[in-house]
Image: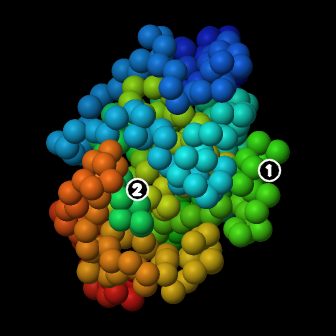
Amino acid sequence: MRGYKTKLGWSDVTPKPLWLNRRQIIAGGAALLASPALVRPASAQITAAASKYSTADAPNTLEDITSYNNFYEFGTGKEDPAAYAGGLTTDPWSVVIDGLVDKPGTYDLADLVKDQPLEERIYRFRCVEAWAMIVPWIGFELAGLLNRVGVQSGAKFVAFETLVRPEEMPGQSSPFIEWPYREGLRLDEAMHPLTILATGLYGEAMPNQNGAPIRLVVPWKYGFKSIKSIVRISLVDKMPPTTWNMLQPSEYGFYSNVNPTVDHPRWSQASERRVGSGLFGGRQDTLMFNGYEAEVASLYTGQDLAVDF
């Protein structure tokens, strides 16, 4: 994979969300970079198989999804990512895969996702601040990639890191977080078919503010577990450090499953408000595991989820 050479075009060898992103960066010019989330050229429509894992709920609008984000590399405000992420360079892009794998290396993004089947998955997405949205992601199962690089028998966890580029990510000038942003999953969580690496949403390449060009999506966990703009994936034998657990271990556990029976120390998690429902929009009860209890509860058999929160 690492040394892959071809005379074919990007559209022949690369999943469409990626080659569209490359073409947009090269040809789109300043206008595209100034407002990537709002540009929906006809050529940017992505064809992907619908998924059996999709929720029947109607998705939030593209505006909701691309204008109300947490991405601390661009600032702490919900509007900061949309305002400041346009200057992020996502081509070229590579991802280091290392640790307990058979095929470690630095992989060009096109080679990394080559031959991975793309699906559209409409997932519930829940933030720890008690807001939620429904997002139509385009992606592929993380398990497919891990199987491709060969997970060794001693691996128990998967660790992830986000890009560090303070000249393009102004939030990284803050010492509030020890950069790079880090996240992790237990291996069985990472291999679960609900866990995907997303390269697009709403039929388009991934907008910068949503984690371009490749991000994790783990729909039964709080949104901060779904790390953005990934540059490293490591297979390890011990629980890896994760950013929010490092910052506030009493508030943010490693697992970070959506669990309405375990409150955040500063607010209740028992109900949520849908983004786009307005300031006085009705709240609804938070679902266990964000509505994916039937699929993932067996992963935690025998665990005390009030302790492993």
Query: CA separation, marks 2 and 1?
Result: 27 Å
Read off the residue under disc 2: 218
x%, y% of residue 296? 27, 64
Q: Identity of the amino acid at label 2?
A: Val
Residue at left 66%, top 26%?
34
Name which residue type carries label 1: Pro
**Residue 273 position in % (x across, y down):** 29, 58
Going from N to C along the chain, the mark reached first, 2 or 1, is 1
Q: Quadrant of residue 62?
A: top left
Which structural element holds mark 1?
A: loop
In the displayed structure, 300 sits above or below 169; it is: below
**Residue 166, numbered circle:** 1
The correct choice, above or below, for 134 with respect to 20 in the image is below
> Which part of the image, by quadrant, shows the N terminus?
top right
Q: Residue at x 31, y 40 (%)?
A: 60
Toward the front, the furthest residue is 280
Q: Residue furthest right?
A: 167
User: Residue at left 42%, top 72%?
Assistant: 256
Instruction: Look at the numbered discs 2 and 1 and tell me whether their residues touch, using CB distance below 8 Å.
Output: no
Residue 10 rendering spot, x and y as whole percentages: 60, 17
| In this rendering, position of residue 109 left or right of residue 290 | right
Residue 64 lies left or right of residue 79; in this view the side is left
